[in-house]
Amino acid sequence: MAKYFHENTILYFDGQMLKATEAHTNLYGQTLHYGYGVFEGIRSYKTENGARIFKAREHYERLIHSCQLLGIPFEYTVEEMTEISYKVLEANDFSDAYLRPLVICDPSMTLINGQPSKLLIAAWEWGAYLGEKLLNLKISPYCRPHPRSVHMEAKAVGHYVNSILATSDARKSGYDEALLLDCDGNLAEGPGANLFFEKDGVLYTPSLGHILPGITRATVLEMCAELDIPVEQGHFTAEDLFEADSAFFCGTGAEIIGIQKVDHYHFPKDWASTIGHQLRAKYLQLVREQTTQPASIEA
Ligand code: PMP
């Protein structure tokens, strides 16, 4: 059995709390056949106030927006999905966990959108990650999909074929992960995380347009505003990265994780003295509610 569930795991699917072993779906849906579905990746953390879902509102707003962009009919509100998520955590007695909402479209082998959808919210335990091993990245031969081909702001199931190809290629070449360029050759993002790099005390990150607008990326920008760390968003190339002092990936799963090398370039600054390292410490406090949160952040 997959490690994501066992015989007593409870999930939410289409109006019901069910055992994962008893949940089932139709094999003739557009999500399974064509990648036409949307999802989210959310973390909950053990805090002094119990299990708290970090940025639930932002994640569920993005899920609704993804449905709208793809034309998937979807009725749930942010509040409903947040409540269900806490029920799933409670039913499984989880606090440090990963939540996986997935919107699945009903059976149809046509290419016409607008099929009614069903919501799955599954969760599995994800203990505190203590390691701080830095990543070695390979600039991927795959570029991110063109924003005129798909809606890159949507977290759509089908977009992750590109991510799987890029990660698998990087692993096969002996790297930890890939770094993808956009179709114009500018730096874009990782297969499941956004990129920041530091040069002379300033942080740089690719502008929105060719990347997923990461919720962790937005949190990093908020933390930088609070800490008076200058950040520039723009179009940058691999050559810019090869002159940088340090770099990191950020994402719900990755949190904030330092990068040691990209291809043959080794970042010169000791990770412990980088802006990324400082932000990582603050982020880990924030998600566990161990510090004062900026006004815009909701649990
Ligand atoms: N880019 C991609 C392609 C991703 O899959 C993710 C993970 N959702 C991110 C960036 C980071 O987004 P977030 O911070 O919202 O998890």
Image: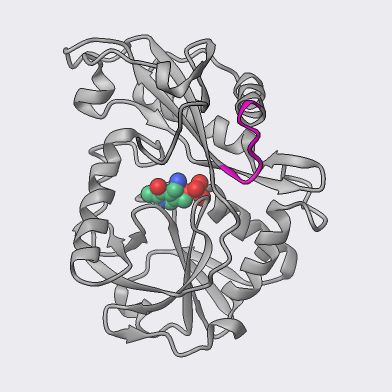
Left or right of 135, for residue 284: right
Observer-nearest residue: 158 or 29?
29
Task: Give the percent coordinates (x, y) of residue 249.
Answer: 46, 64
Q: Does the rendering let one see residue 108? A: yes
Task: Give the percent coordinates (x, y) of residue 161.
Answer: 23, 43
Q: Is residue 193 magenta?
A: no
Quadrant location of the N terminus? top left
Q: Does the rendering let one see residue 213? A: no
Q: Which residue does the image show at 19% across and 57% down from the upper left?
A: 142
Quadrant location of the C terminus? top right
Looking at the rendering, which quadrant does residue 292 occupy? bottom right
Segment tinted magenta in the rendering: 91-97
Residue 239 position (above or below residue 24): below
Task: Give the percent coordinates (x, y) of residue 252.
Answer: 53, 50
Task: Give the percent coordinates (x, y) of residue 104.
Answer: 36, 20
Q: Which residue does the image show at 19% across and 24% down from the upper left?
A: 33
Q: Is residue 94 magenta?
A: yes
Observer-nearest residue: 40 or 11?
11
Residue 263 position (above or below residue 171): below
